[in-house]
Image: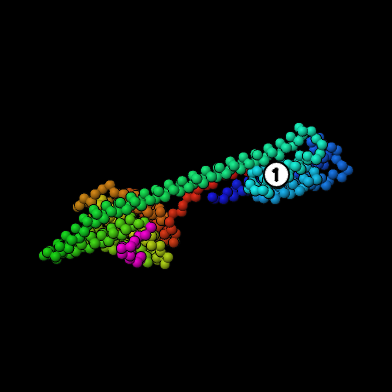
Amino acid sequence: MHPPPPATIARAVVFDVVLAGSVAVVAGLLRALGSFDGDGVHPPHPLPWWGVLVQVAAGAALVQRRRRPIASAGVVFVLSLGDPVLAGPFAVYALGAYAPSRRAAWALAAGLAVTMCEPWRAQSGSDVFVELLAVVTPLLLGKYLASRRGLILALAERAERVEREQAERDRQARIEERRRLAGEMHDMITHRVSLMVLQAGALRTIAERDNVRSAAEELRLTGCQALSELRELVAILRDPDDPTPTGTPARAAEPAGLDVSDLVADSRAAGIEVDLTVTGSAPADHAPAAVRGARRVVQEALTNVHKHAPGAHVTVAVRHEPEGIAVTVANSAGTRTPDVDLGTGGTGLLGLRERVELLGGRFRAGPGDAGGFTVEALIPVGESADAPPRPIAHPVPDEGAA
């Protein structure tokens, strides 16, 4: 179970100090005015200061009633051997509320009951009953509050355990769903892309014109790259905790810095005019997740230009700043309708926003000047970019000050 918050501990300490001081002052004043017992208040002796000191010391011992209830009650018991002290009922309450159920606690409670009732002194049965009630009532009240506090803590611990179990079940359900999706992707998409690669290879073999063979080879290489990325994605979906499970080839070495020249070259080969500018020097502590995230932003932005704005002029700017990698992809309005319908209704930009924000960065996408579109992202490059999200701590029930 989590320890109480510091604010709760501070309130409890302040309450104990105020209580101990109040009991010490009140008991000292009453003792200075005269001794008190079941028969009332008697005039003080010529030198009542020893009794005043005993009452004050007994009240001061209540400061430790919560942390060391047995020791505090023991001091009060020793001081009450000569004369009943006002701190006695408070010490008995502390034994019931904070002390473990041990023989020492019960023995001290019985001893305090004897010193407060003073059975050796001649007194009526009603006086003995009232004095005994002044001991039993705080003891029972303390036991009740201790049981109630223990029940609340037990219920809080049970609720926290149920919440952890539910979170684990949800995590397992997500993993199973990811594995199911990975299986479907492998069975459907990988099969179709493999057929495309085989057909492109066959076309390259039988084509007579050089430009057709070159286009078929580019198509085949693009399909092979798509297959490689798809297999890596399927492996991550199957086991999110281990992106290179047994039987899967290890991932290639991560690049030391961000390089999007190949993406720009592919877009230029597809007929899109792209200008690339890179400013700043890449630091040596680039996080691989930040590099992959920035590259994914450029890739998705260029893909959207191919889909929605063919013939547009695109500017790709990569800036290495102290805060991280800043990427801006801006395009003008398209000059013609798309040659091939690549489909609409995807969630590429939404996925990019989630990915960048998970890395601790900022993302913005929206219409630009003259009917174009602009995608901007700033991704931190420190080691924190690869750190997993922190779990949410659950609060612990606040204990009362009494």
Horizontal side, residue 379 vs residue 94: left or right: left
Looking at the rendered structure, the secondary structure element under dot 1 is helix
The secondary structure that dominates the magenta segment is loop
- Which residue does the image show at 76% across and 32% down from the upper left? 126
Residue 188 image offset from top left, x and y in percent: 23, 53
Q: Is residue 249 magenta?
A: yes
Which three-letter amino acid code belongs to the residue tagged 1? Ala
- Which residue does the image show at 41% across and 56% down from the upper left? 359
Query: Quadrant where the C terminus lies?
Result: top right
Q: Nearer the viewer, residue 79 or 235?
A: 79
The magenta stretch spans which residues? 241-255
Q: Residue furthest left?
A: 208
Residue 239 image offset from top left, x and y in percent: 35, 57
Q: Residues within 10 Å of mark 1 (few under 14, many from 20)?
A: many
Which residue is labeled 1 in the image? 109
Instruction: Determine the image quadrant of residue 143.
Output: top right
